[in-house]
Image: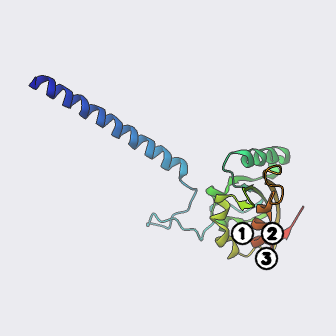
Amino acid sequence: AEKLKKAEEEKLRVEEEKRSALAKVQAEAAAKAAKPVAIKAEGTGVVDRSKPTLLASKLAIVFGSSTGNTANVAELLKKELGASVEHLKNITDLHPVDFTVVENIILGVPTWHIGEIQEDWAAVLTELRALNFTGKKVAVFGLGDAKGYPDTYVDAMAELLEPFEKNGAKLCG
């Protein structure tokens, strides 16, 4: 009986180690996938959101996408525009200050429910409101549910454009 008990305890210990190792691997993979492109302040390991992560460029397409639909449209736009698009980025991979090093910006945003802006864009609106976009040209495309929410269809486009327009960008399209 003692031998069976020890064998059972060993089996449980091994299973727990396997679960723990799997959880660690999954956590590391999730952290790697979610890690934003960021510049770290020298020697501190702290992300410095005051410095751009992009090199200066002529044209970037930046989108927020919860379901992948807006990302798909952004990719189609890039394919259509070709090499003139120097950056195709999800807003989660950028800092708002990145917009200051790009001359022409195409923004992609879906509208959720009753006119709500997509959550990744909502998270950076305050930072966008503090930037100067003088000399930038900005266009926007939006996705939404026109059938289910006809009164608020693509309202997020206006909400997203507001900080750009108020801070000097020329709206195009």
Question: Dot 1: within a 10 Å radius of its alpha carbon, few (fewer than 14), some, or many (20 or more) residues?
Answer: many
Mark 1 and mark 2 lie on one chain; the one further toward the N terminus is 1
Quadrant of the frame with the N terminus: top left
Question: Dot 2: within a 10 Å radius of its alpha carbon, few (fewer than 14), some, or many (20 or more) residues?
Answer: many
> Can you say whether 37 is above or below 13 in the image?
below
Residue annotated with mark 1: 100
Residue annotated with mark 3: 166
Q: CA separation, marks 3 and 2?
A: 12 Å
| SS at mark 3 in the image | helix
Mark 3 and mark 2 lie on one chain; the one further toward the N terminus is 2
Residue 64 or residue 172, whichever sits in front: 64
The picture quadrant where one finds residue 120 is bottom right
Residue annotated with mark 2: 136
> Marks 2 and 1: in contact by CB < 8 Å?
yes
Q: CA separation, marks 1 and 2?
A: 8 Å
Q: Which residue is drawn at 58% across and 68% down?
A: 49
Q: Position of residue 25 (x, y in %)?
A: 42, 41
Image position of 125 (left or right of 83): left
